Image (cartoon, rainbow, N blue to C red):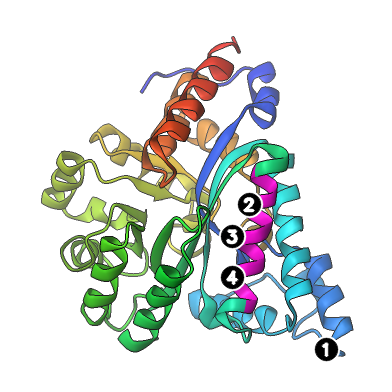
Amino acid sequence: MTSMRLSEPQRSAVKMLPKVELHLHYEGCIQLESIETLARSGDQPMIRRTKDLYSFNDLEEFLSTLDWICNLVDSEHQIKTLSQSLVNYLRGQNIVCAEIIINPSHWRLSLDSLLLPILAEFARAESQFGITLGLLPSIGRHQKNADAMQLVDWCVSNSHPNLRGFSIDGSERGGSRTDQFISAFKKAKESGLGITAHAGESSGPQGVVAALDQLGIDRLDHGVRAIEDPALMSRLAAEGIPLNVCVSSNCHNMYSSHDQHPLPQLLAKGLLCTINTDDPAMLDIDLSSELVAVADAYDLSLGDLKQLQLNAIGAAFCPLDVKAQLAELIENEWSAIT
């Protein structure tokens, strides 16, 4: 990596430049005003003061808040509205390619009522705005393999061009619970879905190894605790496994500061990293500010940030011709800024 801080014009340009985000949770993009509207429409009291709703002590409290928010939604119309708000957020950030993770276990809607309206809105946004969008249904580690197989079967039966991958998320504490999902992930991979997994966040390197060996992942969400195992680091670099890193999110619940985060070491070891926000509404961040914060913390140049965007294109689950178009767009527009 070069050592050159962003100039003020470059910092301002980051928001306007085209960007790619691969580690973004649908549930974590719901804005506070939308939650207030949902609560009022369902005559539900807020569980905390609105300004404190996104204050958490640990990952478990974070996940329980997600469940409460998602259970406010009881109609396809509300899902359509939330999906339109998400698309508007992405467009405001000039995110030209995004792959969105959604875990149906947080929601009380059926798979059809939850996922089909999102896919329809994603297809509409692609056609109307030229933004490349993928949906990645995710199983939770607290669930059973039967749940995972049901979700995979739904994905296979509802083949859709915006249905791009299959994921696993949730707390890794108390055992990774990865091995029970082997058959579901095998079927997902055989059906052509890209495979990703949250690992190496609340678990150590063993969670990453399990995701590699048991689930056959194409990329990792988080994965940062691989830094604790030099042999694993070498393996990730050799196999070209991308890491969708969320620095601010990690600093919220894992590391005390940017100085403690291993991103510089991961990059120095040749790992393919991307920069993401994880849950931007909950963390009160966006991809533009995250990129600038990462550049400031680790003395990255605009060229370094461009390379991280190109890494994301390489790791995306979209078709190869779309990747080529996106890579050309990123290369041309980022290189034009001096």
The three-letter code of the residue at mark 2 reads Ala
Residue in view at x 52 percent, y 24 percent: 330
| First reached walking from the N terminus: tag 2 or tag 4 | 4
> Does residue 303 sit above or below 68 in this rendering?
above
Instruction: Give the camera-side residue of 92 and 133.
Output: 133
Q: CA distance from mark 2 to mark 1?
A: 34 Å
Query: Label 2 crowding class (10 Å Cα cut-off): few <14, some 14-19, many 20+?
Result: many
Q: Which quadrant: the C terminus? A: top right
Q: Amino acid at mark 4?
A: Leu
Q: Is residue 59 left or right of residue 79?
A: left
Q: Earlier in the sequence, mark 4 or mark 3?
A: 4
Question: Compared to 77, does 41 lie above or below?
Answer: below
What percent of the width, then of the height, locates residue 233? 19, 47
How packed is label 4: few (under 14 Cα within 10 Å), some, or many (20 or more)? many
**Range of residues picked out in magenta:** 113-126
Residue located beneath label 2 in the image: 123
Sequence order check: which comes first, mark 3 or mark 1?
A: 1
Q: Residue at x 63, y 26 (%)?
A: 17
Query: What amino acid type is highlighted by mark number 1?
Result: Pro
Where residue 116 sits, quadrant-wise, is: bottom right
The dot on residue 279 is: 3
Q: Is residue 147 above or below residue 226?
A: below
Find out whether residue 46 is within the magenta segment: no
Does the CB distance between marks 2 and 1 fall below 8 Å?
A: no
Quadrant of the rendered image containing residue 56:
bottom right
